[in-house]
């Protein structure tokens, strides 16, 4: 409201300034015209004196009436200062009908002349013959112009002020209503109600904000559901080996279970399982901090991919999986070797798990402008469209085994390199994970 009132006030102020300038220029124009009229009257009086060689009262009466029509009240004095003729005396010599007709056509009010007389000397052949004293009648048409201008500005100011106040009330209500809804929704979410959503109307910035808020709330709801699932998964993963170890140890202490190699190997297996769970969590923490400890080197990509494929030869042989590597010899990648190995071990591990039997896994690499692209393609079960947005979330898992930390670790390590990871998948046909790692040298070396 304040802003709109200020804008309206500025508009009215501009109009007042413009009106003042117009009235000032109009007044100056009028004053110039009146000065010209006085000179006309002076010239007429000097001409009449020259013609009659004296002041002729009958001629002066006509000149006074003519001056009245020009808006001038006049007095003529001779060279001794005696009054010869003035406007009031001239009007008395007119008939009432003529007087009324002259006043109506002149458009002046003879009762409203004001101010002192201005004196102008009258000359004939360089000799002063008298003096002309004048003052002006206010012109009714000019006064009407000024009064209408003032009235128009007053009405404009009132209308603009009213429109500004009314518009500000409407706009304020329209602006604060969605903001109030947003505040209530935010307060509800702060109290744990993640199902809160804002009704969206329109397509302005507030509607965009509401869209963003709803997306944020939806993401928070999914994250909260994942956290609950993670807690349950983590507790289950930890509880199972701990329960087994506790039962076996209690049985050994009670003499129910003999202390022999088989039992100790079972305890060791459960202990390793616990260590693997803790190691996965520790791996994720290290991946988050890996950006500070990267030791980048430029290494040939093809031998690296071949070494990754070689690592999985035994697992691939059990499932009759065939590996292929497609990469030019001159392709280089700028990365931390240890972290890069961890990235592709996790990706290939998931690819092996996704293939039941008799599939293929293809590792390919290529130089692109500003980056190096590496693809891991499998012909496994694929990923459903509903799962694709969630696979990089921590502890999210579709299968029963594992903690769901492999792909989050991959994403953290790729982000640490300043790169990006994408996935394309069709259920029943397989998946392709694409990793792009920045490499400025490829700006000039790539095809």
Image: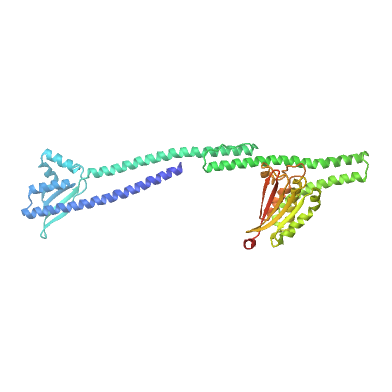
Q: Report the front residue among 173 and 117.
A: 173
The correct choice, above or below, for 26 with respect to 127 in the image is: above
Q: Percent from the top left, x then y, of residue 410?
A: 71, 51
Q: Report the front residue among 217 and 319.
A: 319
Regarding residue 199, the answer to whether it shows in the image is yes
In the rendered structure, the answer to whether residue 432 lies left or right of residue 316 reads: left
Q: Report the front residue among 185 and 88.
A: 185
Q: Report the front residue among 345 and 131.
A: 345
Q: How many marks?
A: 0
Task: Name the quarter where the C terminus is drawn.
Answer: bottom right
In the rendered structure, the answer to whether residue 293 lies left or right of residue 260 reads: left
Q: Residue furthest front?
A: 358
Q: Percent from the top left, x then y, of residue 254?
A: 92, 38
Quarter of the image where one finds residue 398: top right
Image coloring type: rainbow
Q: Percent from the top left, x then y, of residue 93?
A: 9, 42
In the rendered structure, the answer to whether residue 162 lies left or right of residue 304 reads: left
Q: Residue at x 34, y 48 (%)?
A: 18
Q: Residue at x 35, y 48 (%)?
A: 17
Q: Percent from the top left, x then y, of residue 386?
A: 67, 41
Regarding residue 293, the answer to whether it shows in the image is no
The correct choice, above or below, for 155 with respect to 78 in the image is: above
Q: Residue at x 12, y 50 (%)?
A: 76
């Amino acid at each position: 409201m304040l802003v709109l009132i200020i804008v309206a006030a500025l508009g009215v102020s501009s109009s007042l300034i413009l009106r003042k300038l117009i009235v000032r220029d109009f007044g100056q124009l009028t004053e110039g015209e009146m000065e010209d009229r006085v000179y006309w009257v002076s010239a007429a009086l000097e001409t009449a004196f020259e013609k009659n060689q004296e002041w002729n009262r009958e001629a002066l009466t006509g000149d006074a009436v003519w001056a009245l029509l020009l808006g001038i009240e006049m007095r003529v004095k001779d060279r001794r200062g005696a009054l010869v003729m003035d406007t009031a005396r001239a009007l008395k010599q007119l008939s009432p009908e003529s007087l009324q007709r002259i006043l109506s056509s002149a458009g002046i009010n003879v009762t409203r002349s004001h101010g002192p007389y201005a004196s102008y000397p009258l000359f004939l052949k360089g000799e002063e013959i008298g003096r002309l004293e004048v003052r002006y009648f206010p012109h009714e048409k000019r006064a009407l112009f000024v009064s209408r201008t003032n009235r128009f500005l007053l009405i404009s100011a009132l209308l603009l002020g009213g429109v500004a106040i009314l518009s500000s009330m409407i706009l304020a209500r329209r602006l604060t209503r969605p903001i109030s809804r947003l505040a209530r929704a935010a307060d509800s979410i702060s109290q744990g109600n993640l199902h809160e959503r804002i009704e969206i109307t329109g397509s302005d910035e507030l509607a965009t904000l509401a869209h963003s808020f709803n997306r944020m709330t939806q993401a928070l709801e999914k994250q909260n559901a994942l956290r609950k699932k993670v807690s349950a998964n983590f507790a289950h993963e930890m509880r199972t080996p701990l329960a087994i170890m506790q039962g076996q140890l209690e049985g050994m202490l009670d003499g129910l279970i003999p202390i022999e190699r088989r039992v100790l190997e079972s305890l060791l297996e459960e202990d390793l399982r616990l260590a693997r769970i803790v190691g996965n969590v520790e791996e994720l923490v290290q991946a988050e901090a890996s950006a500070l400890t990267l030791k980048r080197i430029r290494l040939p990509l093809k031998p690296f991919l071949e070494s990754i494929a070689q690592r999985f030869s035994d697992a691939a042989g059990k499932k009759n999986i065939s590996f292929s590597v497609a990469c030019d010899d001159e392709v280089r990648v700028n990365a931390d070797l240890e972290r890069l190995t961890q990235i592709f071990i996790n990706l290939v591990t998931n690819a092996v798990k996704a293939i039941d039997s008799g599939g293929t896994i293809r590792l390919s690499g290529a130089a692109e402008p500003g980056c190096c692209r590496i693809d891991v393609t499998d012909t496994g079960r694929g990923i459903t469209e509903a799962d694709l947005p969630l696979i990089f979330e921590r502890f999210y898992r579709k299968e029963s085994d594992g903690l769901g930390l492999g792909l989050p670790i991959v994403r953290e390590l790729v982000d640490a390199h300043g790169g990006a990871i994408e996935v394309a998948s069709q259920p029943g046909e397989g998946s392709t994970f694409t990793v792009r790692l920045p490499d400025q040298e490829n700006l000039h070396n790539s095809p």
